[in-house]
Image (cartoon, coloured by chain):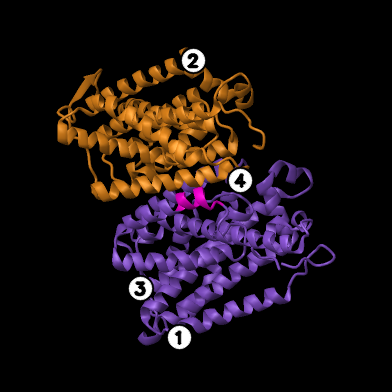
Amino acid sequence: MKLSKEGASPFFTRIGLARGGVFIVALIVMPQLFPQHWIWNMMFFTVLYAAMSVSWNLIGGFAGYPSLGHAAFFGIGAYAMAAIFKSTHLLTNGWQPFFIMPLIGLGCAILALPIGLIAMRTRADVFAIVTITLLFVAQTLGYNLKSLTGGAQGAGLSRAPFRLDIFEQPFYFAAVSLLLLAMGIAYFITRTKLGMALTSIRADEDKARGVGVRTTAVKVMAFAVSVGITGMAGGIWAYYLGFIYPQFAFDPLITIAIVLMTFLGGRATVWGPVLGAAILMPAQQLLAYYVGGSQIYLIAYASIFLLIMLLLPRGILPTVLSKRRLASLAKQGNMSGISSTPAITGGSNS
Amino acid sequence: MHTLIQGVILGVLTGGVYALMASGQTLIFGVMKVVNLAQGAFVIASAYLAFTLFTQFGIDPLVAVLITTPLMFGIGVVGHWLFLRPLRREDATELSILITFALALLVEGILSITYHTTYRSINTSYANKAFDIGGFSVSAVRLYGFIVSCALLVLLYVILQKTRFGRAIRATVQNPQSATLLGVDSNRVKAYGFGLGIATAAASGSIYGLLFPFNSGSHYDLISRLLSVVVLGGLGSIGGAVLAGVIIGVVSSVAAVTWSPTWSEMTFFVVLLLVLLIRPQGMFGRVERGAL
């Protein structure tokens, strides 16, 4: 929580580097300690959703444009993967799809550019409208472009030739790389002018434009990067499952899950969405194990979301941090530090 | 040519129902500046309600409107009080979108557990009847649905134009601050305005249930259509929503008969994209501060 003397914080701080290092080591070591398949499976989904939440946060949290269409890009990524590696295609090297992944992400990002340009001409309302409609259109295409997607019968992918006892591990580490990429981008955003630009768009877009922020470029770029990562997550997911259906690839549940994770942990922070995913995904897996049935998730997710919005609208991390900050300031008897703390760095500063 | 005119007739009749749904949606936006993503879910919930009333008690869906509408009005007022009123922060717009989205999913989850996800349709005695008017076949359900929709739209118009409550709503739409200064209780107007919007959803839900088979997931399809209608008409303009409802009804129905029923669903999205490209504020929308 120390603010540097000059007022501007350095790009890397020692404690920040230590925290990141511990996190990476934990991601690598933790599943080794519990080598059961279901733990790997749960960790895989947790990390995958954490990556998507962090990426949603770039546009939905920092810039304040709540996208409801991320599930569309998740599905597009998944079906792109399915189209490249059809089940008839025999893989000689199981790692090959992971190397194709960045291309899929790039494709999703390029696809997002015109959509973002049109949807973000007006304010957040219309953006939400376009993105939710996009989800429906993508779903309709998933069902009806039968030659490409196989329609409701689903699409099969080539089977990953990994040893069965360590089957989940390559996917897990692919998801971890994606999460680290997303967090790296989020961290970069909080530490550079870009973050200021995005936050200023959320606060007052007209004023931001007035003082010279290139609002259109910044927000369309944030949207493209965000859905690019989500598309890659879709690709990993499809390869992991080996068989995908439109109703699961273009599932509004994915959108509400990543939005909920972001809001639970704390939006516009680097660590918030990760925390949210770490709480919710294991909870969902346990719920699935004990109760089953995705309608229950719908009700559970929606109710938890409504409760959080009413009781903890800022999310866990910002609430805890601001309490701690106030307490430490009160101890020093120095209240002048509050106003000089940049709001955007929220959970990530120090 | 015959199929084309047939398509136009069908489109106008269906468009009437969309006009009713969309007028509620745009009313809510006008009063509260909230895009209500739960509107479709409330339409489907009312369709299920009409379905239950019909199968259990034999009440005709068009009569059931008298029961579902007040009920949904109450649910709307309570929903506003519970979830939307507490939002008084600067990012209320953004949060209210997410809250109504969560509400939609909550309603969908409850419906899919109560009624399962199989498609339902309400088969009244006149479900398959059709009139022959000048060589064109007009199905009875659609005609009755259209008439009831028009009657309800007129009722909505009278409420908004002729009552004190309506005047308070219109004042709030035009200028919330001046309305408050002149003694309009903005919280009450917002709550009742939201309730009124949900009540129109309830009324159109009964008719929707008569016209189309539906399941708990139908609200995604519906909300995309409704939002396209509302954007075309201009967010906040009720007259615009009615006109846009009929226009989009006709366009998609003509696309269905001349091209393909599967892809006619896409016409909504095409219209939405065109509007945003050419005239983002819609036909009758005001240019708000902050919009380009």
Which chain is indicated by disc 3?
Answer: A
Q: Quadrant of residue A151?
A: bottom left
Number of other residues with Cα within 10 Å of mark 2, as a class: few under 14, some 14 to 19, many 20 or more: few
Which chain is indicated by disc 1?
Answer: A
Q: Is residue A283 above or below residue B154?
A: below
Is residue A313 left or right of A201 when viewed as pictured?
left
Residue occupied by mark 3: A87
The span from disc 3 to disc 1 (Cα, nearest Å) is 34 Å
Residue occupied by mark 2: B164
Q: Nearer the viewer, mark 3 or mark 1?
A: 1
Residue occupied by mark 1: A33
At 67% from the left and 34% from the top, the residue drawn is B289
Magenta region: A305-313
Residue occupied by mark 4: A120
The span from disc 3 to disc 4 (Cα, nearest Å) is 38 Å
Give the amino acid at mark 4. Answer: Met
Chain letter tied to orange = B
Q: Position of residue A120 (x, y in %)?
A: 61, 45
Number of other residues with Cα within 10 Å of mark 1, as a class: few under 14, some 14 to 19, many 20 or more: few
Q: Are marks 4 and 1 on the same chain?
A: yes
The tint chain A carries is purple
Give the amino acid at mark 3. Answer: Ser
Is residue A62 left or right of A133 when viewed as pictured?
right
Q: Position of residue B143 (x, y in %)?
A: 27, 23
Instruction: Between residue B216 and residue A232, name the one nearer to us.
Output: B216
Q: Position of residue A207 (x, y in %)?
A: 74, 42
Q: Is residue B119 above or below residue A280?
A: above
Instruction: Report whether residue A120 is seen.
Output: yes
